[in-house]
Image (cartoon, rainbow, N blue to C red):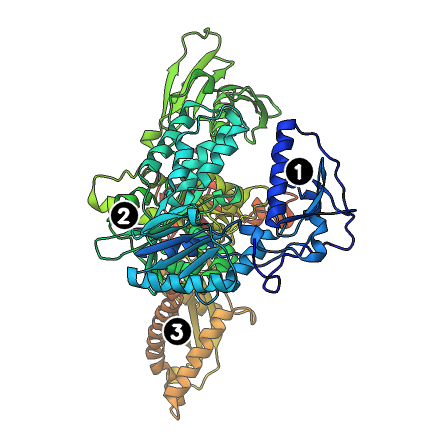
Amino acid sequence: MKGIHPSIVSHKLNVLPTARPVRQRVRRFHPDRQKIIREEIERLLEAGFNREVEYPDWLSNRVCVDYTNLNNACPKDSFPLPRIDQIVDSTTVQGMLFFLDAFSRYHQIPMSPVDEEKTAFIMPHGLYCYKVMSFGLKNACATYQRLMTKIFKPLVGRTVEVYIDDIVVKSKTGEEHVLHLQEVFHLLRKYDMKLNPSKCAFGISAGKFLGFMVSQRGIEVSPDQVKAVMETPPPRSKKELPCLTGKLVALGRFIARFIDELRPFFLAGASGWTDSYQSAFEKIKHCLMQPPILSSPLLGEKFYMYLAVSEWAISAVLFRCPSPKEQKPIYYVSRALADVETRYSKMELTALALRSAAQKLRPYFQAHPVVVLTDQPLRNILYKPDLTGRMLQWAIELSEYGIEFQPKLSMKDQVMADFVLEYSRRPIQRKEPSEKEWWTLRVDGASRSSGSRVGLLLQSPTGEHLEQAIRLGFPASNNEAEYEAILSGLDLALTLSGSRLLIYSITASLPIKEVILLPIHVQVNPSVTETSTCNTIEANQADDQEWTEDIISYLRTSTLPEEPKQAHKIRVQAARFTLIEGHLYKQSFTGPYLRCLNHSKALYVLAELHEGVCGNHSGGRSLAHKAHSQGYYWPTMKKDAAAYVRKCDKCQRHAPIPHVPSETLKPISGPWPFAQWGMDIVGPLPAAVAQKKFLLFSTDYFSKWVEAETYVSIKDKYVTKFIWKNIICRFGIPQTIIADNGPYNGQVEATNKTLITALKKRLEQAKRKWVEELPSVLETASIRMADYQQRAAAHYNRKARPRSFKSGTLVLRNVFENTVETRAGKFQANWEGPYIVSKTSESGAYHLQKLDGTPLLRPWNVSNLKQYYQ
């Protein structure tokens, strides 16, 4: 048979120079088979496809030659094959189709003469080699595709589509079809390509092409593939399961959320074939009974895409809208999640689904604008300037496409409605806890002279034991030690997530309901003897409404509160949260996912960060920032952190002493008015009336009040009379009188200076009239002193931050030298206590008493006190 001329194309093996030839031995055959083999060899010799050969270097066996050794010695030809998706899409929406089939296919291409003997094979009656390209040779597909591309190069993509040996001629109308066939037959005659008329189909509107049924309606599943799945029996072993899975994978383009539907078959390999897997298999069969018809894209048309994520897979569907009331799918994409990807947030999974779909459907994204329909704020996230990590990488990859983002549309087709599943999680099966799920706590406490101690033994439902011994830092009785043991045990059980607890106490029965300040249910176990007590404690979580419950309920079951405003609030909040392995996480655009905590767990995290092993007793704002950086979140982080720091005992005792005034200024110069006087004598002065030359005056240190008299001379009787008349008779007996014995009497010296200066300014030339001017000078000094005190008080009070305490308030007292702890040194606390305020006064003084009721000896000013929080 005349085939393709060698000048056009010939198959070359290009065997590696380092490859060693391999000669296989002849195999035995049944006489009937030997007869058939001889007839086949004679037919090939008559057609000119084979010839006899002598002394070949490479030798294989049988007519269906096993070229494994020869293929291993040949390099791979990298000639590209067309994308099946693109070829199938371009074949649809055509009115007339013509399917061609080449006669003898590969045998029309000659072998390179230097490589003919390398194809030699051994038979019982001789050695033969191929003169044409044989089936089973490496790179045969690439050589054939190179030939088809060369022959139909002017028509490929316009009127002809070729994939190796599958050729189809497409036309819109019958008149065009005739012209297209003339062009194709002209090229076939030019290159001497022979066709098999019995396998060619002319002028049809639908046909099977590359495993799909293509027609003017669109792309459909091949009936042969559907039949193969329908007739496949349930797998009876692990070896049969991959066969079924392979048949289903070939149909992945037509099944919405294919990986979600196929997941049971991947799990069946470990646990065997069960009824649940059979039901999933029947569900897929039902889907294949009415498979969707995929549409073909039009040039320049806008596409739309829905995204879906689940716990183990991400999916997408690309569709077109020929009219506002039509949505026709083009391609279904689905991919299983890797182990690390299952821990991504909902936002990241949605972005990953878009990125995977863009990689899979790259030609569609490059040739068409794509509108992504989703309720997630993908546009705001991907275009955010401070993106980091994988989100930044995905944003860069997607930036080359013309992607738009819009809210979801209403479903116009049942096929589309079956696909859209924004975020599905397996529902958590809630069951009543059995007796095996109880935690058991055994406690004991004792009081000794060296200190009280507590012992705990906590047993988990699986049998693990946790022992703990605690030494109390305060004196306690036996009964108090028992209480502390139970409280410590409950804290330990709560830390280990034990919600159902049995408590055994060695001593007599304890009134647990009075001790535990939690919403718990107490029930006495009647099976326990009187010498010990057993109490059943179960946390009543319904009474403790946490902020996470409504959001978790909405994410799991789409349940919303009945109140419309609250329902809208939960719906908006839930968009920023996701569930991972049953735990609620808050999505962070540029940082890690934040584990959402309830009130009790939040307090535990604050305690560990603030005063744990690595805690440094930081402030409220810093503590909230640390909790956020460690990956935790709750709505009142800053408020709770500030409240926790304010109540920390160590932070309160070592807090810095405030220097801001705590009370308004009350100027004083002595212990009380007119208790302390300073006296001085001024003179001799110019002689005045009655020859008076000396001035005797006295100043009250408390009120700055001045008493003055003039004398001719200074004698003891005058001083005694002055004190009796001007001080004792008017203000009472003073506690102290300071005479002028030197410069230490600063108050009197200052008064002297003020009076002399005022008299000088008033007298001028009339020096002898100082006696008459003295009363007015004294009044002026008093008025100015009052004004000065008011101005000084106003200036002082501007910075004052008055604080007051009510009776019964717990306060800390500033540590003084007589109350400093011995050997404390620089590590001495700044505050001591706490004390109880027993009596208050308007002057800022407070009477205190100890916690046992013992009063302190004297009152304390508010500047030395601060409130104690607990």
Mark 3, Cα crowd under 10 Å, few <14 / some 14-19 / many 20+, is: some
Q: Could you say whether the residue bearing mark 1 is in a helix, strand or loop?
A: loop
How many numbered markers are drawn? Answer: 3
Type of amino acid at the residue the image marks with label 2: Lys
Q: Do we see residue 208 in this rendering? A: yes
Horizontal relation, residue 132 to residue 166: left or right: right
Q: Quadrant of residue 782?
A: bottom left
Is 321 or 676 nearer to us in this picture?
321
**Which residue is at 50% across, 65% downward?**
190
Type of amino acid at the residue the image marks with label 1: Arg
Q: Which residue is mark 1?
A: 62
Measure how far apart labels 1 and 3 are at the Cα level.
149 Å
Q: Quadrant of residue 211?
A: top left
Q: Position of residue 570 (x, y in %)?
A: 29, 45
Going by the picture, which residue comes out furthest to the front?
46
Going by the picture, which residue comes out furthest to the bottom?
765
Q: Nearer the viewer, mark 3 or mark 2?
A: 2
Q: Which residue is mark 3?
A: 709
Above or below, comparing residue 444 to residue 653 in the picture: above
Q: Earlier in the sequence, mark 3 or mark 2?
A: 2
Type of amino acid at the residue the image marks with label 3: Glu
Mark 2, Cα crowd under 10 Å, few <14 / some 14-19 / many 20+, is: some
Q: Earlier in the sequence, mark 2 or mark 1?
A: 1
**Which residue is at 43% across, 36% downward?**
262
Q: Which residue is mark 2?
A: 569
Q: Nearer the viewer, mark 2 or mark 1?
A: 1
